[in-house]
Image: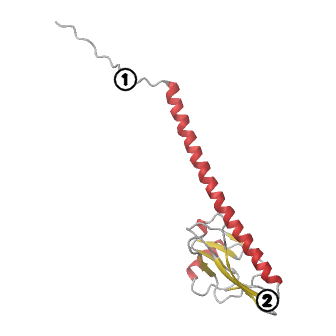
């Protein structure tokens, strides 16, 4: 009988414990890096939304201090394209006008101090803010302004004898 030789697997790759551990560490580092980048981008959105709120308050205060004025204020900062509207909402008033569906959602999350909301609120890192010196007696509640490509343009005005700024 012929001698049958056992086949040797010279092409087989030996994976040692160190190699497996290294692969696991690389996977963990990649996961942490992806998480950190996502958190960084989310914080950038929060910063832009915060700057928009600050700039809106500054513009409202500028008009409020004057005896009269009017401006169409377009914000330089871009917000998330998922945010379709910015809304002024008075939770103490009855929901009315063309944005009643939005009003019903805002009613659930409305805070007692806030009157300015990003919609949909889940797309924003800052759900709401209080804008001072704004006349919240509006023809609609909520009064929503659509965003265009992530940019917002708000018309602010005040006539002689008025004590608060109107949003139109």
Residue 89, image x, y percentages: 67, 79
Proximity of marks 2 and 1: CB atoms separated by less than 8 Å: no
Q: Which residue is mark 1?
A: 12
Question: Mark 2 vs mark 1: which is more N-terminal?
Answer: 1
Separation (CA) of disc 2 from disc 1: 83 Å
Residue 163, image x, y percentages: 81, 88
Q: Residue at x 42, y 23 (%)?
A: 14
Q: Residue furthest top?
A: 1
**Could you say whether the residue bearing mark 1 is in a helix, strand or loop?**
loop
For residue 68, the mark is: 2
Q: State whether residue 28 is above or below residue 6.
A: below
Q: State whether residue 134 is above or below residue 33.
A: below
Identify the image quadrant of residue 82: bottom right
Identify the image quadrant of residue 90: bottom right
> Nearer the viewer's eye, disc 2 or disc 1?
2
Residue 9, image x, y percentages: 33, 20
For residue 129, the mark is: none
Quarter of the image with the N terminus in it:
top left
Residue 140 visible here? yes
* Front residue of this view, candidates 72 and 139: 72
**Could you say whether the residue bearing mark 2 is in a helix, strand or loop?**
loop
Quarter of the image with the C terminus in it:
bottom right
């Amino acid at each position: 009988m012929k001698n049958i030789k056992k086949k040797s697997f010279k092409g087989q790759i030996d994976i040692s414990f160190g190699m497996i551990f290294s692969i696991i560490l690389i996977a963990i580092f990649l996961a942490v890096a992806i998480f950190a980048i996502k958190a960084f981008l989310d914080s950038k959105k929060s910063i832009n939304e915060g700057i928009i709120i600050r700039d809106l308050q500054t513009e409202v205060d500028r008009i409020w201090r004057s005896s009269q004025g009017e401006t169409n204020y377009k914000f330089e900062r871009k917000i998330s394209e998922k945010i379709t509207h910015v809304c002024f909402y008075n939770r103490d008033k009855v929901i009315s006008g063309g944005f009643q569906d939005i009003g019903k959602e805002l009613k659930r999350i409305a805070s007692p101090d806030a009157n300015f909301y990003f919609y949909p609120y889940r797309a924003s890192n800052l759900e709401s803010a209080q804008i001072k010196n704004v006349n919240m007696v509006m023809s609609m509640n909520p009064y929503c302004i659509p965003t265009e490509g992530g940019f917002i343009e708000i018309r602010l005005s005040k006539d002689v004898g008025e004590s608060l700024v109107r949003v139109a």
